[in-house]
Amino acid sequence: MKIDRKIQNFIDGEFVEPVGGRYLDNIEPATGKPYSQVADSDARDIDLAVAAAEKAFADWSKKPAAERSKILLRIAGLIERDLEELARAESIDTGKPLSLARTLDIPRAASNFRFFATAILHTQSEAHITDNVAFNYTLRQARGIAGLISPWNLPLYLLSWKIAPAIAVGNTAIAKPSELTPMTAYLLCEICREAQLPNGVLNIVHGTGSNVGAAITAHPKIGTISFTGGTVTGKKVAEACAPLFKKVSLELGGKNPNIIFADADLDAAIAGSVRSSFANQGQICLCGSRLFVERSAYKDFVDRFIEKTSSLKVGDPLDEKTEQGAIVNKAQLDKVKFYVDLAQKEGGKIALGGSAPESINERCRDGYFFPPTVITGLPVSCRTNREEIFGPVVTITPFDSEEEVIEYANDCDYGLASSVWTQNLNRAHRVAERISTGTVWVNCWLVRDLRVPFGGMKASGVGREGGIEALHFFTEAKNVCIAR
Ligand code: NAD
């Protein structure tokens, strides 16, 4: 497997040029320089992908589940075989530390295929007897062509989280990775060919959101849309899909609260909070960017949190010792800097970080780096505390009571995930029940069991991906009612 200079589309089992012949530069975040080119496709390429996906649907949807399962398991095995190369490609493409790509993104991409490959072998159908009148059963059928649109922060992991359930249940798919991080999706195409996935079952079309993404959401033959990305884009996707009555799942932004009670195991809470604040440079939708600490533990927590955070090694993502890599692009780096300035205007104090590092190494001289940054002294309702930054910047605020911190946690448009650190079991249950987020982690963060529903509340999205919910999302539940 090699990292090509030109990333082409993958349609009907072939690598093809975009119809318009245009390419975009693919920039390596750690160096700020182009290292490959990616197809800049448009609606004409989506038409070709739809034709291929439509043709493949008839056979693929009728294949026995066991056969589809075998192919998905082969894909999982090949991802595991190529783990090192995929991790390196992902690190170059995204700027994340190689060690993170190797231990999180790529293994989880393999798990996604493995999980849905076996899940389809164990599904059940519901049956309902209507007294002496009728017998009903639920027939779950593949819906047709699924459009899968994903962001740049966990490119292979999030795309495979959509591709695997969509094709496992018999749909064919057109996937659009982020134009900022297309490399691992491109490499996945080679794996799919080697795994003998039939042509046209998975088509990957590269390009911008306004060209390719919009063409997917507008296409009348793509009836299912699974989207992960920002909340502003999510609105556009919802608007495009509504008049066509598409089935839509939206996984959107987050501004997640991380609550530390004074009775928590502080060692665990500090280690967990450093991770949840700064993993992948804070560019994980689930990162806990608003920390709330009970006042009696506040000073101790802040001192120790800052001490531990300041030991994180910011460096070249390809260096094995690096714990903090590059920000994905210049626009995202500018956004981070904008919010650090704003925080100071809003009265915040920079307790750690706050300005770009002097130098990383010669290779990374022009890369997009920003250190872990901790801000204190801000009011809960200010913009810095309400808007998603999606970078290595967190705020810490003290609180005095359980009631107060629940109010703080919910005082936000987003509702994706939260963490609660306490050793009081009753409190953990009470608080979890009252926080408006799709996931509540207690004394942990980013623990993922693929069987559980996953998704956001409020502006963090609608629909649930994961487990049985994903299989249901990608199928149509038809009721067959037979008179007795
Ligand atoms: P983004 O919304 O800019 O882009 C996401 C994808 O949508 C990209 O592939 C993009 O090309 C495409 N797109 C852009 N405009 C489009 C349009 N009009 N129609 C269709 N598609 C379009 O998001 P991003 O900057 O790539 O990713 C960061 C965001 O994603 C953050 O807000 C983060 O919280 C969110 N995110 C959410 C989850 C989750 O599970 N909830 C997971 C990861 C990231």
Image: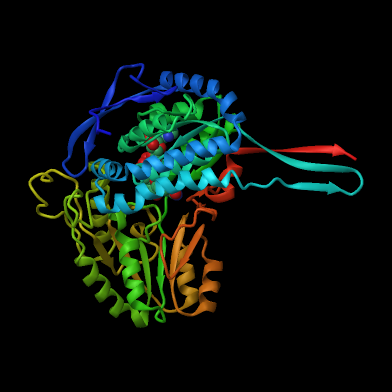
Q: Is residue 38 above or below residue 266?
A: above
- Left or right: residue 262 versus residue 127 is left
Location of the N terminus (image quadrant): top left
Question: Residue 286: where, in percent of width, then height?
Answer: 40, 56
**Quarter of the rendering occupied by the C terminus:** top right
Residue 279: % across, % down: 31, 57
Q: Nearer the viewer, residue 409 or 450?
A: 450
Q: Residue at x 25, y 33 (%)?
A: 2
Residue 18 location in percent, x, y? 35, 20
Taking the image as drawn, is residue 338 in sight? no
Residue appearing at x 51%, y 57% in the figure: 438
Q: Hey, which quadrant is residue 282 in on the image?
A: bottom left
Q: Nearer the viewer, residue 265 or 389?
A: 265
Residue 293 percent coordinates (x, y):
37, 74
Is 324 or 333 nearer to us in this picture? 324
| Ligand 1 picture quarter | top left
Q: Report the residue at 27% width, 71% height from top.
A: 305
Would you say 465 lies left or right of 89 here? Answer: right
